[in-house]
Amino acid sequence: GAVVSQHPSRVICKSGTSVKIECRSLDFQATTMFWYRQFPKKSLMLMATSNEGSKATYEQGVEKDKFLINHASLTLSTLTVTSAHPEDSSFYICSASPAGVLETQYFGPGTRLLVL
Amino acid sequence: GNSVTQMEGPVTLSEEAFLTINCTYTATGYPSLFWYVQYPGEGLQLLLKATKADDKGSNKGFEATYRKETTSFHLEKGSVQVSDSAVYFCALSDRQAGTALIFGKGTTLSVSS
């Protein structure tokens, strides 16, 4: 089946630093990738949708200058949390759609970010 | 707007018990409905889906029927196993409105032997 990987799986950083999270589709080409944030005991919150080669579309309330998304190829999207603060600590999950059909999404295992 | 509401957890059951996790939705168009499962330490996996009214999705002994009249998509399993312990998410996608997946808050299921 379709596999999506994320790296790193876990990261701890100091407040003020930037962290980059990679999302890769391993065995298919992903025209669309999604980034979610999952809070404890809360649902997944869609942060942004990115299409290969174009700018990401951010959901209302998500700061695009803080959460930089790059979808440079059909198999790789990156999320960079800039100048991270403790309130950015969360579980970040990406997903990928193989054929631009938004309802077909394969999810990565997630990245746990802890900002000290 | 579109939204998904699912029952609050956690749900704690003994092995071989019957499981129901309620899910209702609101949608302006004609959504597809999904159940995803997240096992401990893993990413979300599609469990089952239904794309139109009266469709029944099924997988691994789990079933859910798309009920348009009650706007529901309840998840059921006749006999749960310890290995079913996970977080279950109900979700919808409204293709006509062009929306991506909208998730419920998730229900944690814990099955003991």
Image (tube, coloured by chain):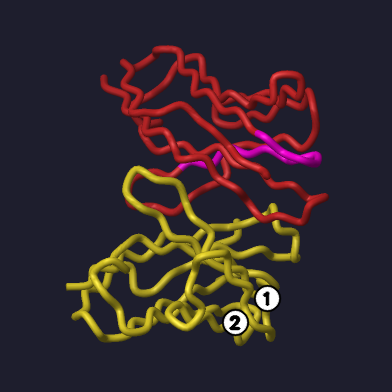
Chain colours: A yellow, B red
Across and down, in percent, residue B29 comes to 80, 41
Q: Which residue lies under the disc numbered 2?
A: A71
For image coordinates 39% across by 74% down, the residue present is A7
Left/right placement of residue B14 relative to residue A101 reads left
For image coordinates 40% across by 62% down, the residue present is A110
Q: Which residue lies under the disc numbered 1?
A: A51
The numbered disc on residue A89 is none
Which quadrant, please, contains the C terminus of chain A? bottom left
Q: As displayed, is residue B75 above or below residue A43?
A: above
Q: Which residues are magenta?
A: B26-37
Task: Give me the chain letter of mark 2.
Answer: A
For image coordinates 68% across by 86% down, the residue present is A53
Q: As displayed, is residue B106 above or below residue A92?
A: above
Left/right placement of residue A80 relative to residue A89 reads right
Asked if disc 2 and disc 1 are in contact, CB closer than 8 Å, the reply is yes
For image coordinates 57% across by 45% down, the residue present is B46
Across and down, in percent, residue B82 comes to 33, 27
Across and down, in percent, residue B11 comes to 35, 24
Task: Give me the chain letter of mark 1.
Answer: A
